[in-house]
Amino acid sequence: MNKFVKGIVVFADSNDDNATTFFNKAKSMGINTIFIDTKRLSIDYDIFTDMNSIKFLSSDAKRYSYFVRAVNLVPLNPFAFSNTQKFNEYRNYYSLMFSFLEILRSWNTKVVNPPSTFWCHYFKPYVYVLAKSYGMDIPQTFVTPSFREIYKIYKNYKNSNKKIIFKPIAGGKTVKILDDSNIENFKICGDVYIFQELIHGQNFRVFTLGNEYLCSLALEYDTSKAIDYRDLDPKEVKVKIIEVPDDIKKKSVKLANGIGLYFSGIDFIFNQQGYYFLDINPAPMFVGFEYHSGFPIIEKIIDYLLYC
C-alpha cells in the first residue's frame, strides 16, 4: 500500500447496496475502510478545516482516498420546507459535504467522484451535445415541454413506421415507447422528457476508471418484454464481457475525462449502422454487472484508490 494512503472512505447513503458491497469487500481485504452515511455527516463525523488542512476523525483527511457513491445535486427549494430554519440546516449541510470533498480533490486527494461532476446526471441534453463534440453518434433526439411539438414528432415517426421512446430529462424513470396509449398524457404533463428515435441493437455499458478504459459488458434480454432492462426481473437479464472497437474505448475515456469523472459507466447500443451513445453515469451501478459477468470491478476501483 502507498505509505501516504491510510485507507478508503466510502461516501454514500447507508442503504446503498453498491456502496455497502464495496465497503465490505475492502474490509475483507484488510483495508482500513470507513463508511460515511451522507445523511449524518455533520452529526456523527468529526471534521475540521482551517483552509490549509482538513482533519477527519482527528487525522489528516488527505491520507485517505474517497469513493463517493452518489450525492444529490438537486437544488434545494425553500418553499418545500415547513420553516426557514430547516431549509438553512439542509443548505448548510450540503455546503459542508460538497466543500469537504471538493477541497480534498483540489489538493490532489483521490475523490471518486467529486460532487462537481454529478451535474451530468441531470444535464442530459448538454451531455448529448458533449458526446457529439467528442465524435460519438447519438440517436435522433428532441427535448421539449410543448405538446404541439411532441405530437408533431410522434406523427412524423408513426407515418414513417418508426418508433420513438421517451425518458425524463434528468433521469429517475425507465425508458418507455411513445404510442397512442400515452401520447395524450403529455397535454397535462408537468415533467420534461427527452424523445429519441428507438434504436434496435445490442445494449452494453463501457466502464472507465482513471484515465483508462476498464471493460465493456453487454446486456442481453428480451426487448419485446421491456425496452429498459431495469423494468425486468434481474434473472431475465444476462451480462457478458464483450470487446468493442478501440475508437469507442478512446471516445469513452475522453468523454469521462472531459466531465471530470474518475469512474463512469457509459451506455451504448450497437447495430449494423454503428455505435450510438445513450448516457453517461457519474455513479453507475456495478455490483450486479460484476456478479453476473465475473469482471472484478470492485477490486479494480480499490487498486486505483490505493496504489495508482
Image (spheres, rainbow, N blue to C red):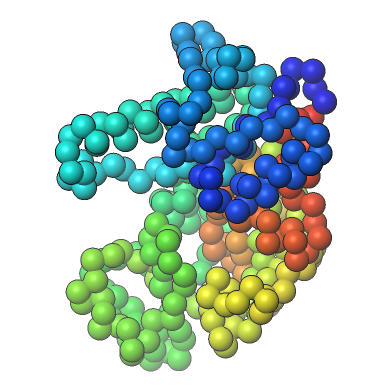
Q: In the rendered view, would you say 74 is above or below 84?
A: below
Q: In the displayed image of the protein, which residue is found farthest to the front?
A: 44
Residue 169 figure quarter: bottom left
Left or right position of 176 against 251: left
Left or right position of 42 against 308: left
Seen from the viewer's position, the closer of residues 31 and 132 is 31
- Judge whether residue 238 can be spotted in this image: yes
Q: Residue at x 81, y 39 (%)?
A: 29
- Judge whether residue 257 can be spotted in this image: no
Left or right position of 299 against 52: right
Q: In the rendered view, would you say 250 is above or below 99?
A: below
Q: Position of residue 255 (x, y in %)?
A: 59, 47
Q: Residue at x 75, y 61 (%)?
A: 291
Q: Position of residue 81 (x, y in %)?
A: 21, 44
The mark total stands at: 0
Question: Which quadrant of the figure contains the N terminus?
Answer: top right
Q: Residue at x 62, y 15 (%)?
A: 59
Left or right position of 237 against 197: right
Q: In the rendered view, would you say 102 is above or below 145?
A: above
Q: Position of residue 4 (x, y in %)?
A: 74, 17
Seen from the viewer's position, the closer of residues 265 and 71 is 71
Q: Residue at x 72, y 22 (%)?
A: 6
Question: Which quadrant of the figure contains the C terminus?
Answer: top right
Residue 160 figure quarter: bottom left
